[in-house]
Image: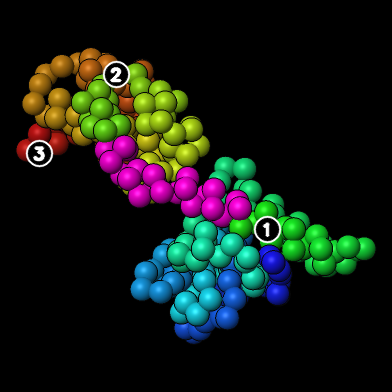
Amino acid sequence: MDRLLFLFHTKHPKNTYIQLHQHECYELVYYFSGSGITNIGSSSYSIKPGTFAVMSPRVLHDEQHDTESELLFIGFHCENDSAIQHLNKLFEDDEKHTIRQLMLRMEHEFTEQQEGFFDMLNLLVRELTTQIQRLARLNKPMRLSGGRLKYVINFMDEHFRQHLTVDTLAKMSGYSYDRFRHLFKETADVSPQQYLQRKRLEYAKTLLLQTHLPISEVAEKSGFVKDSQFCTIFKRETGLTPLKFRRQPGG
């Protein structure tokens, strides 16, 4: 029988360390805010808002909170444990925040304790384990996302001088708009827009130093919509106007 054993909503101050420990039940920890590292078994994961950790019975785990963190954690028994017993890792909630909503519903039932709350909590545990299995299947391609995103990045490297929208790139990747932006930033450390902007600026610098093209033509050939936009971004990023950059010693 699926059964809730405990539930606790808390905050950990900055630089809190929860030592290695284990449970005789399953545990799920949902991170509403904060950052840090959690070690689950032999793997390390970065804690961030909207992620949750799943630990099977007797699996060692710890937490290092680099900033103040808010989390909700539960302990539970799972009747069909063969479906989740190997999912010892950190997951990312989906765009609908399905796990977050379930956890908050459980907390409400746990706190209000209306008639039938005990049975409702156990039903929610069953729903939770089902949703975890679904998310586990959805998260599997994420390990390969670098490969899928690599093709998009290759395309951007070759076509950055053209007008490219994030929506078009997201469709090319096969992800939703929000998921694509999130995964791209995870992979490249910058947003898609910032990545394109950097490529365009580097190309513009080459044109400025190696050609005598007018500034307006440099802007156009580099993929900027207007030369005024180009000049503004160029000065913001380099501290120089395009003309001063061209005229600097060695230019």
Residue occupied by mark 3: 249
Q: Nearer the viewer, residue 197 or 183?
A: 183
Mark 2 vs 3, N-terminal side: 2
- Looking at the rendered structure, the secondary structure element under dot 3 is loop
Q: x%, y% of residue 165? A: 40, 23
Q: Which residues are magenta?
A: 130-150
Kindly identify which numbered label has been placed on residue 162. Answer: 2
Quadrant housing the C terminus? top left
Around disc 2, counting alpha carbons within 10 Å, would you say few (fewer than 14), some (14 to 19), or many (20 or more)? some
- Residue located 59% across and 71% down the image: 27
Q: CA distance from mark 2 to mark 3?
A: 31 Å
Residue for badge 1: 126
Q: Is residue 80 visible?
A: yes
The residue under the point 48% across, 32% down is 177
In the rendered view, would you say 63 is above or below 204?
below
Q: Is residue 70 magenta?
A: no
- Asked if residue 59 lies left or right of residue 6, the reply is left
Q: Quadrant of residue 89 in the image?
A: bottom left
Q: Nearer the viewer, residue 82 or 56?
A: 82
Q: Where, quadrant-wise, is the N terminus in this rendering?
A: bottom right
Residue 55, percent across and down? Answer: 52, 70
Q: Quadrant of residue 149?
A: top left
- The span from disc 2 to disc 1 (Cα, nearest Å) is 50 Å
Query: Which residue shows up at 33% across the image and 25% down it?
Result: 230
Q: Nearer the viewer, mark 2 or mark 1?
A: 1
**In what element is the residue under mark 2?**
loop
Q: Position of residue 83 (x, y in %)?
A: 52, 59
Q: CA distance from mark 3 to mark 1?
A: 69 Å
- Badge nearest the viewer, 2 or 3: 2
